[in-house]
Image: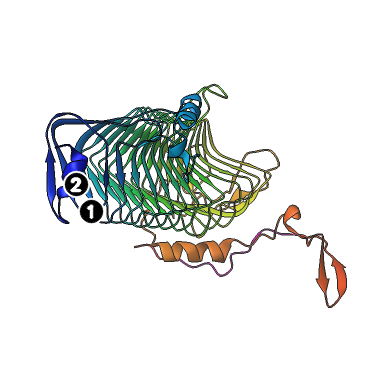
Amino acid sequence: MDIQAAISAAKAGDTILVGPGDQNSFEVDKPLAIVGQGEAVLHAAIQKPAIKIICDGVTISGFKILGVGKDTTAKFNYYMENPAAAAGQRLDQPNAAIVISADDVSLKDMTIFGSQVGVQAENADNLTVQNTTLESCDAGVSLSHCRFCKFEGCRFSNCRKYGLDVEQCDDLTIQNSSIVNSANAGLLLKESDKCQVQDNVFSGNSFGLSLWNSSFNQVRRNRADHNYYGILITDSSNSNTIADNVVEENRRSEIVKGFGIGISLQENSSCNLVIRNTAKKNFNGLDVSRGCKLNAVFGNNASDNSHGIRLNENRNNLIFGNNFFNNNINAYENASLNIWNTTIGNYYSDYHGKDENGDGIGDQSYALPGQDSKSNDFRPLTKPFHDGSLNLTALNEEVRRYARYGPADDEIPPFRMKGGTIVISSRVPTSPPKWSDSKPLDIG
């Protein structure tokens, strides 16, 4: 009896054991557990997944699946030769090894090789994928419009586009997994909120982890190395927390020889927290570029980079309590107005000012180098800062307290309507922020 026949004969809640050897593809329409034993092997085909799951509450484990890559000509020929197969079907679907359109599905101890998409899930909540290897796929996993999914102990390797491609999904957890050698992004979170990405390794990808237009995500304790960008935050705002990650040796030569960035906030990413990260041996350890504002960069250690931190065309970001040491340029700012200290500033290994009263704060300010830079750290530290335990509520309050520069010229509307009258705007001159209401930070 093949697997499909066994599914037809089974009752809800049954377990089907599948022995070693090549097996036929199957579709699951009952809440069953299907367990591959030995080396049970399934083969996907053009527009025919090895496993299709259309019922809630299914568990699949123990299979090796050999997939089918992208082949537009073969797909066209398939539908020309099998017109009935095309009737009522979406013809834009990739060749996937596993297709899921149900909730509460669990995949465990699987190996998927060479598929256009290893696992494709749409509108599938509470999907769990554990201890699964996805290798040499165009995309290891593609998720859209899913919630409360969990990936744990998985390995994504040598994917031609993405290891894990997530779009419009909320409350996902990706942990204790590795994503290596993806030609594009190892993990892409696009328009996805409240996700937990923790204790993972991103290595050898173009982009290790990329957040795009996503909010309220927690990115913690990951390692990103030998990527073009280790962690990239683009057009993403509202309390994304990037904390306790290690980004090291992110230098590649695809575009500019030796260029690479550890953690980068770009394109209007605002109101995020970048805290207690370690950035070593990158081109730019930390990077904030183009229209980002009201971000807090606190308690990070950046060493042995070409630039410890580089800010370009931003304003009202708060950078304090960081250690910048042994970088070619410790800190650099261009065409920006940011705030580099609260009641404390940052430690710079090239700061040589005096501390006459011994309070650990230099008596002379540290002028931030860079084209068109007008910023100073008025309270530079004379010793490395070691207490990075500022609570997040207090950190957000510090941003609101100190970030007082007016909007950039290009952020001021040229005119506005007021009571039926067109009012032409003019730029109000700015002055350095005043900190008369400073008080000790709530550290502890």
Q: Is residue 240 left or right of residue 363?
A: left
**Helix or strand or loop: what does disc 1 sit on?**
loop
User: In this figure, which residue is indicated by the disc labeled 1?
Assistant: 30
Choose between 427 and 290: the one closer to the eye. 290
The quarter of the displayed image where residue 333 is located = top right
Q: Amino acid at mark 2?
A: Ile
Q: Is residue 349 left or right of residue 147?
A: right
> The N terminus appears in which quarter of the rendering?
top left
The quarter of the displayed image where residue 430 is located = bottom right
**Helix or strand or loop: what does disc 2 sit on?**
helix
User: In this figure, which residue is indicated by the disc labeled 2?
Assistant: 7
- Location of residue 72 with respect to 230 vertically, above or below: above
Q: Which residues are magenta?
A: 430-441
Q: Is residue 5 left or right of residue 27?
A: left
What colour scheme does the image use? Answer: rainbow
Q: Amino acid at mark 1?
A: Lys
